[in-house]
């Protein structure tokens, strides 16, 4: 099984996955950004967004499926993925591989996202780059917020302003039966 935690940058995906990992120690954590970082070292990303690379989407689906199949453990995935075609492509590949995907979307108001993003440091040794990353994250807020209505029908919307513990409770309650397998 895969538990995909989706939402805008600053919505709390990584924090929630860390909380889930504490409570569900057999789960593996797979961050698809790592695949993007590797691809950026190998090929040019014309749009600047590695999700636009078909190879990224193929590798993410393959890696996630491989982790479930090879290790027979649940996989936690914290990743913003709001392009409906990309969601369909990745989730479709996982479905064809026979893997259950539990999809959660952390819904957070724009002003809260901006505050959270402004409070983060992405590259502490490079303030100029840090500000570029913050600006890029903030530039994606509208797209992420608008995507809520286009999420797959089985997506569970979560109030991203709840505590990580409350969010983990909701996720584990939803996947409870599958988590015990």
Image (tube, rainbow, N blue to C red):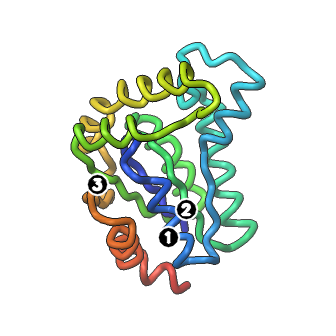
Q: Residues within 10 Å of mark 1 (few under 14, many from 20)?
A: many
Could you say which disc has been placed on residue 153 in the image? 3
Against 119, is 31 above or below? Answer: below
Against 121, is 48 above or below? Answer: above
Calculate the distance from the C-alpha at mark 1 to the C-alpha at mark 3: 23 Å
Residue at 36% over, 76% down: 169
- Name the quadrant of the N terminus: bottom right
For label 3, the SS is: loop
- Name which of mark 3 and mark 2 comes first in the sequence: 2
Residue 163 picture location, percent across and down = 33, 66
User: CB atoms at circles 3 and 2 under 8 Å apart?
Assistant: no
Residue that sits furthest to the top in the current view: 46
The residue that label 2 is drawn on is 76
The residue that label 1 is drawn on is 20
Which quadrant of the figure has residue 129? top right
Q: Residues within 10 Å of mark 2 (few under 14, many from 20)?
A: many
Residue 71 picture location, percent across and down = 73, 70
Residue 116 picture location, percent across and down = 36, 43
Which quadrant of the figure has residue 109? top left
- Name the side, left or right, on which 91 lies relative to 36: left
Residue 162 picture location, percent across and down = 28, 63
- Name which of mark 1 and mark 3 comes first in the sequence: 1
Residue at 55% over, 84% down: 181
- Tag nearer the camera, 3 or 2: 2
Calculate the distance from the C-alpha at mark 3 to the C-alpha at mark 2: 20 Å
Residue at 44% over, 53% down: 13
Calculate the distance from the C-alpha at mark 2 to the C-alpha at mark 1: 8 Å
- Name the side, left or right, on which 75 lies relative to 172: right
């Amino acid at each position: 099984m895969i538990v995909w935690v989706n939402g805008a940058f600053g919505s709390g995906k990584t924090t929630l996955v860390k909380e889930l990992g504490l409570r569900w120690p057999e789960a593996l954590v797979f961050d698809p950004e790592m695949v993007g970082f590797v691809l950026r070292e190998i090929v040019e990303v014309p749009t600047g967004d590695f999700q636009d690379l078909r190879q990224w989407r193929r590798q993410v689906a393959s890696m996630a499926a491989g982790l479930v199949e090879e290790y027979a453990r649940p996989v936690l995935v914290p990743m913003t993925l709001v392009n409906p075609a990309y969601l369909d492509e990745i989730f479709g590949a996982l479905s064809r591989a026979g893997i259950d995907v539990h999809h959660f979307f952390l819904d957070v108001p724009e002003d809260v996202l901006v505050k959270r993003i402004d409070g983060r440091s992405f590259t502490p040794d490079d303030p100029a780059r840090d500000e570029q990353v913050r600006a890029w994250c903030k530039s994606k807020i509208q797209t992420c917020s608008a995507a809520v209505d286009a999420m797959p029908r089985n997506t569970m919307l979560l109030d991203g302003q709840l505590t990580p513990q409350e969010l983990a409770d909701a996720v584990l309650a939803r996947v409870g039966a599958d988590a015990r397998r």
